Amino acid sequence: MTTLTLRRPDDWHLHLRDGAMLEGVLPETARHFARAIIMPNLVPPVVRSTDAQAYRDRIDAALPAGMTFTPLMTLYLTEDSDPDDFATAYESGVINAVKLYPAGATTNSASGVRDFDKVRPVLERMAEIGLTLCVHGEVTDPDIDIFDREAVFIDRVLDPIRRATPGLRVTMEHITTSDAVDYVTDTAGHIGATITTHHLMINRNHMLVGGIRPHYYCLPVVKRATHQQALRKAAVSGNPRFFLGTDSAPHTDDNKETACGCAGVFSASNTMACLAHVFEEEGALDKLEGFASLFGPAHYGLEPNVETITLERSDEAIPYPAKIETGAGPVTLFDPGHPLHWRVLD
Ligand code: DOR
Ligand code: ZN
């Protein structure tokens, strides 16, 4: 038996949804994580500071008695976003970041940005006040192959935005390619990247060989194994620009297991066990605390959590539920396809 004690982790990219789904999934995150950056792609999206405040209140109300959890709210950037409203939301502590979805890139992104010139004033204001832009980094051009959309986004959109807006703090979300690892490693300025649990554990073969596995389908879509290897190397490198954002994104099974299934992997419940597995395989368990608990707060200018959690490794496989039941319907939990031997002690 081995144990590993870390500062309590945070999740720097999380979808909690709303209503019955929120109630169902929130305890799965709050059990292990102290804080999370909450994605604003609700229907309708969280676009104004009053929306973020109201959503934060609904999250607080959904938290079961006895649990503690701090949602770090984001606002959804649209071509109509008001720089003053964003600045007020940030300066009054309502939000910690702003989310950029290119229009049409993913779930509920229709209100996102088509013309990046239209959001210049907001980005400039954000750079002035130190408000972080979280970026869904994929172009939506139908001519660009879905497996190339992240790499093309870096060249055509992200790098030009960063050059035009010196000082803008950027989180490149859920990176999936060696191109993104290289960009984040080598570029100057305040930039970090989140990496999901599932992108460390699966590549496109896992999703497509021997049958199509809808519960492995997410956006940005998992890439070839060489990219997965680059992500693993970045995650265990100890480079503080790379940290955990699970992108745990629940959809009910009937919305995943269908002819046109939704994108999203739900991994909140077993993420820490999965990460311990990956870091152990990489011979880098000593790097897990930085990735899951230290580098994210540093990127966002926050203190790490004071409390700790302890992970325990057993020789026997630890059973995790195949799905969790929510008031909105069953949600399948990420299954890496092999036994897990780690669990978080209560
Ligand atoms: O797989 C994904 N699911 N990627 C996203 O960018 C959005 C998310 C969701 O909201 O379901
Ligand atoms: Zn997401």
Image (spheres, grey):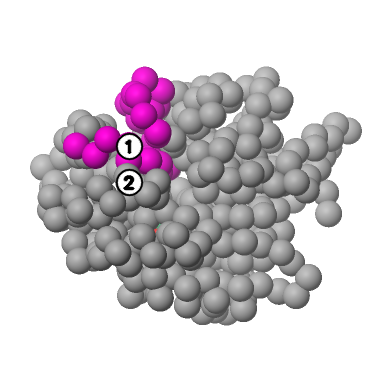
| Residue 182 seen in the figure | no
What residue did someone put label 2 on? 128
Q: Mark 1, residues whose alpha carbon is within 10 Å: few (<14), some, or many (≥20)?
A: some
| Residue 120 seen in the figure | yes
Compared to residue 303, the image places residue 108 above or below, namely below
Asked if disc 1 and disc 2 are in contact, CB closer than 8 Å, the reply is yes
Q: Which residues are magenta?
A: 164-191
Magenta stretch holds residue 167: yes
Residue at 32%, 50% (x, y): give it.
Answer: 126
Residue 198 vs residue 111, the one in the foreground? 111
**Image-quadrant location for residue 139:** top left
- What residue type is disc 2 on? Glu
- What residue type is disc 1 on? Gly
The numbered mark at residue 167 is 1
Residue 325 vs residue 346, the one in the foreground? 346
Compared to residue 29, the image places residue 204 above or below, namely above
Magenta stretch holds residue 306: no
Q: Mark 1 falls on what kind of element?
A: loop
Tell me: 106 left or right of 116.
right
Count of numbered circles in the view: 2
Residue 191 vs residue 342, the one in the foreground? 191
Assign the C terminus to one quadrant of the image. Answer: bottom right
* Lower position in the chain sequence, tag 1 or tag 2: 2
- Picture coordinates of residue 192, whole percent (x, y): 44, 35
Tell me: 114 left or right of 127.
left
Residue 292 vs residue 255, the one in the foreground? 292
Residue at 65%, 27% (x, y): give it.
Answer: 287
Q: Mark 2, residues whose alpha carbon is within 10 Å: few (<14), some, or many (≥20)?
A: some
- Picture coordinates of residue 159, whole percent (x, y): 23, 33
